[in-house]
């Protein structure tokens, strides 16, 4: 038995006071049921919701995590663990990775020809004030019915295609497990130090105003640096700086952070540029702090929305707030960074562990290259970057002291990452600090010694041009435009890395439930890193527990090279995380 399941809510976020007021279902025969919980009907209809989600019926949603979050809030109980679920949005990702939209109405129109203008009448009422619960019930019922039907029709279209492909089915089943793990993470959330966030916001606002006064004194009149038009006037007319790039549509000078950073490099003594960089940094930091404060619940907990398929590669993303892109206290591109991470602390009685895959990208590049010497080197623990440094620099490397060796190794490391993606000789020369001719000679040496790795991008691009897609090690198909086949290597590595982290989250979540009785919980995925909280009272057993986590994170038979993880611990705030060795 399977039915579609679509909830209607008073807002988008269950952790900020929004609630579910109705739901609809549709079975494969097109029978639709609509029920409401508002206007005195909660007590009568809540048992029906509980019965629907008791595990005896498979429920299909479009972004089912959203529907389940609100349903669990309404029921005041967790229902997902033993509930069979499907998600037509995820199904669309598995079958067609490059759709321009994942929105329900778009997909139903694209694949089923169902008109998508039924929301206009509903939105007209919402625009008058209030939310969807204020829409007249007959109109709302029609809207709910269509969405329930759309979801079921998409399931009947996508799911058979997934079932026919064993690799797709394996990926899809993993994604359904990940939804349950992710929902638990979102519900747990991360601790925000409200006092510190408020103090940082106020300080940054003061610094921003001081900087604005300095800008205005320098320019000679009142200006608004937040306006792109005024910023263009300040930089290109008042300061007479060169225009580096134009916007695509309006063909006006670009004034984004990359352009301003490049201008600052070209004109390091320009006071206006320095002030603009400061102003933007203080303003952005204050905005982030206010956003965190606005989104935190009454206990100071942030519950981010973790999108389990945030990119065509399957990589996860995060919003409200984006905790995968929290600013560090230092940065190469920003000379005035804000220590945003310092406002995130472990819960009282806990520490946080950050566990990331060590050298994941390079290990995957070597695996896909099938370069045996390098596969063997990783197995034996040899340093591939030192091997490359010796190849690139020869006697200079062999005679160098520790400090110079570090510089040369760092350069070789950058080249090791650039070459498999198709970097040219001139690019490698720049990375290694050599003249162009010598750089091209060193690249030729690299290609002769490790041709499979050096020409990996060319090989993958050729395959992408031939079939129009690339498959990750786990069988996920990622569409690649034939005229952009050069992106295939990046998609392959990012997609495979995402598949690893997703499987690791599911395994860790179950492991922590079994071993710690759910006292230790997952909190957040960050690209190739997992954040979890761990009780201080259990620290004497931490190495045994973390050893088990390492085991489940590196247990992949799909690769010719071994994987490894590294641990960091947070005892005070995220900005002060420290290396934590698994071996005492």
Image (tube, rainbow, N blue to C red):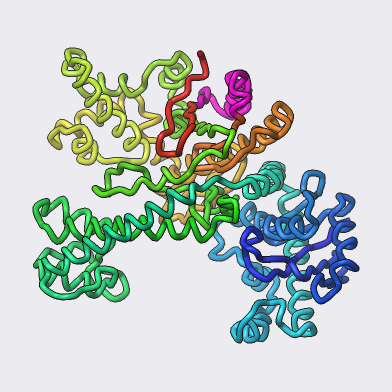
Residue 279 found in image quarter:
bottom left
Q: x, y percentage for residue 521? A: 64, 37
Looking at the image, is 34 positioned above or below residue 268? below
Q: Work out whether 170 lies above or below 355.
A: below
Figure label count: 0
Q: Nearer the viewer, residue 206 or 556?
A: 206
Residue 396 in view in this figure: yes
Residue drawn 83% across the image and 61% down it: 3
In screen coordinates, is 161 left or right of 358? right
Instruction: Name the one closer to the observer, 201 or 324.
Output: 201
What span is colored magenta in the figure? 536-565
Q: Residue 284, how many percent across, how many down?
A: 35, 58
Q: Residue at x 44, y 34 (%)?
A: 361
Q: Quadrant of residue 456?
A: top left
The secondary structure making up most of the magenta span is helix
| Quadrant assignment, res 516 | top right
Residue 122 in percent (x, y) is at 67, 82
* 579 drawn magenta: no
Residue 309 appears anywhere in the view: no
């Amino acid at each position: 038995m399977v039915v579609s399941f679509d909830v209607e809510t008073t807002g988008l976020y269950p952790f900020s006071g929004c609630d579910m007021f109705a739901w609809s279902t549709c079975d494969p025969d097109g029978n639709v049921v609509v029920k409401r919980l508002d206007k005195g009907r909660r007590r009568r209809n809540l048992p029906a919701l509980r019965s629907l989600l008791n595990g005896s019926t498979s429920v299909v949603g479009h972004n089912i995590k959203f529907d389940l979050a609100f349903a669990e809030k309404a029921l005041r109980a967790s229902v997902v663990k033993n509930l069979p679920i499907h998600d037509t949005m995820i199904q669309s990702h598995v079958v067609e990775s490059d759709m321009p939209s994942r929105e329900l109405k778009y997909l139903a129109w694209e694949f089923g020809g169902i008109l998508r203008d039924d929301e206009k009448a509903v939105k007209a009422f919402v625009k008058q004030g209030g939310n969807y619960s204020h829409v007249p019930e007959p109109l709302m019922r029609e809207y709910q019915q269509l969405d329930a039907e759309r979801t079921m029709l998409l399931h009947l279209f996508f799911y058979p295609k997934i079932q026919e492909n064993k690799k797709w089915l394996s990926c899809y089943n993993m994604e359904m497990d990940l939804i349950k793990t992710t929902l638990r993470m979102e519900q747990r959330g991360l601790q925000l130090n409200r006092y510190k966030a408020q103090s940082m916001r106020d300080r940054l606002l003061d610094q921003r105003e001081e900087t604005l006064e300095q800008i205005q004194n320098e320019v000679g009149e009142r200006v608004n640096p937040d306006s792109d038009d005024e910023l263009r006037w300040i930089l290109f007319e008042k300061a007479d700086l060169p225009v580096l790039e134009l916007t695509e549509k309006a063909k006006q000078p670009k004034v984004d952070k990359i352009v301003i950073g490049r201008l600052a490099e070209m004109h390091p003594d320009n006071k206006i540029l320095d002030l603009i960089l400061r102003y933007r940094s203080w303003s952005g930091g204050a905005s982030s702090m206010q956003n965190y404060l606005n989104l935190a619940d009454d206990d100071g907990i942030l519950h981010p929305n973790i999108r389990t398929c945030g990119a065509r590669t399957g990589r996860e993303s995060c919003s409200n707030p984006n905790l995968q892109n929290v600013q560090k206290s230092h940065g190469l591109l920003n000379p005035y960074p804000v220590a945003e991470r310092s406002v995130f602390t472990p819960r009282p009685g806990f520490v946080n562990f950050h566990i990331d895959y060590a050298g994941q990208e390079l290990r995957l590049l070597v695996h896909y290259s099938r370069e045996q010497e390098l596969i063997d080197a990783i197995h034996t623990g040899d340093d591939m970057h030192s091997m490359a440094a010796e190849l690139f620099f020869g006697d200079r490397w062999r005679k160098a002291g520790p400090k110079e060796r570090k510089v040369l190794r760092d350069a070789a490391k950058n080249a090791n990452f650039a070459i498999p993606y198709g970097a040219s000789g001139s690019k490698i020369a720049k990375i290694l600090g050599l003249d162009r001719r010598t750089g091209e000679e060193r690249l030729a040496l690299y290609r002769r010694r490790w041709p499979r790795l050096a020409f990996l991008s060319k090989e993958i691009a050729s395959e992408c041009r031939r079939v129009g897609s690339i498959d990750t090690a786990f069988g996920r198909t990622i569409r690649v435009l034939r005229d952009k086949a050069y992106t295939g290597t990046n998609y392959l590595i990012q997609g495979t890395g995402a598949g690893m982290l997703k499987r690791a989250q599911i395994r860790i979540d179950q492991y922590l439930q079994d071993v710690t009785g759910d006292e230790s919980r997952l909190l957040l995925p960050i690209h190739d890193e997992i954040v979890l909280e761990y009780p201080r009272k259990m620290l004497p057993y931490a190495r045994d527990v973390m050893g088990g986590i390492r085991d489940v994170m590196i247990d992949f038979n799909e690769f010719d090279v071994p994987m490894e993880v590294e641990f960091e611990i947070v005892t005070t705030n995220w900005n002060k995380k420290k290396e934590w060795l698994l071996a005492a």
